[in-house]
Amino acid sequence: MEMTLRWYGKDFDTVTLRQIRQIPGVTGVITTLYDMPPGEVWSREKIRSLKEEVESEGLHIAGIESVNVHDAIKTGAQERERYISNYVETLKNLGEEDIHLVCYNFMPVFDWTRTELSRKRPDGSTVLAYTQKAVDALKPEKMFASIAGDMNGSVMPGWEPERMERVKELFEMYKEVDNERLFANLKYFLEKIMPVCEQYNINMAIHPDDPAWSVFGLPRIITNQQNILRMMKMVDNPHNGVAFCSGSYGTNLENDLPEMIRSLKGRIHFAHVRNLKFHSPDDFEEAAHLSSDGTFDMYAIMKALYDIGFEGPIRPDHGRMIWDEVAMPGYGLYDRALGACYLNGLWEAISKSAK
Ligand code: DNO
């Protein structure tokens, strides 16, 4: 595996490439052209200048998170052809710039959903949290407003204000889309992009739905082992793979994370590793990475990745806000750096004891 950190680009991130470079063992970043609206072609020039910027600080681009999928593709609208061909063009340009990993998601309307962005913990740190009760009490169009105050002036991935202004319209677009339709639209999309992925050796890594169940009655399919294996089979190509996010699949306590990892051998192209602490099955918060701070056995997760011969990038995921840092919720420097060191430590111990 390669240890990486997510970086949003200098105009959006409070964390610098130099700081990332100084985290022991971190050699790459997972990044994106953050201001590129879904559906537009990424030009080679823009990709190249991002790449040069990262490389000038002694790092490299280990993958893109995300190239977002336009809603017309997710809903199967007529204009999807145009957006799919734009997506193919973007993949080709990435491939030509020697980038071979693309993370994306197929969640309708909302990307990941949290109901609090700064829940205070006993040690004074703040974390992202979710309660089903809070979602149930909210109208979807109020979702953005209810968390906007805690964004620390940042634009959160999947929660762009322009998009959130159109929430009602987006819900309308998905009116006829149920889980089966969404599966079919995903299959259609994947079949169209697999040839360019093969040509440029690009691994597609689908991010799970977070939380791993339907919110506001919207369809959600990337939620559990059965569905993800169905997806792997439906387009049975090694380039059709998974971003294994422990914190997202882990929202559903019925998901056995190490077992899921083992069942996806060869198809996990990217891993987000983080811990959650549950207060009840539908009230959880994003704990520190350390096993004992949350509910998951992080050793067992890393061990499963090791055992399947995982070679892709790993990134610590959302961190707590600690040491008075002000940053995008979940994406400060300090706690993610602690996470990277801890995960590297687990990996070193696992690999040495395996020898
Ligand atoms: C949240 C992230 C997601 C993820 C996208 C991938 O912090 O894990 O926004 O990047 O769903 O497309």
Image: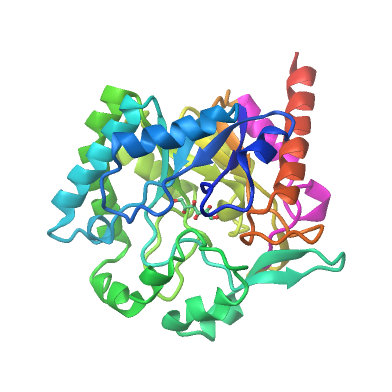
Q: Which residues are magenta?
A: 284-307
Q: Is residue 207 above or below residue 157?
A: above
Q: Quadrant of residue 191?
A: top left
Specify whether 196 is left or right of 340: left
* Residue 221 vs residue 111, the one in the foreground: 111
Percent position of residue 236, x then y: 31, 33
* Residue 198 vs residue 150, the one in the foreground: 150
* Magenta span contains residue 241: no
Specify whether 341 is left or right of 75: right
Percent position of residue 79, x then y: 14, 57
At 37% from the left and 77% from the top, the residue drawn is 165
Q: Quadrant of the N terminus?
A: top right
* Magenta span contains residue 302: yes
* Residue 192 vs residue 31, the one in the foreground: 31
Q: Quadrant of the C terminus?
A: top right
Query: Can residue 270 be seen in this snapshot?
Result: yes
Query: Can residue 268 be seen in this snapshot?
Result: no
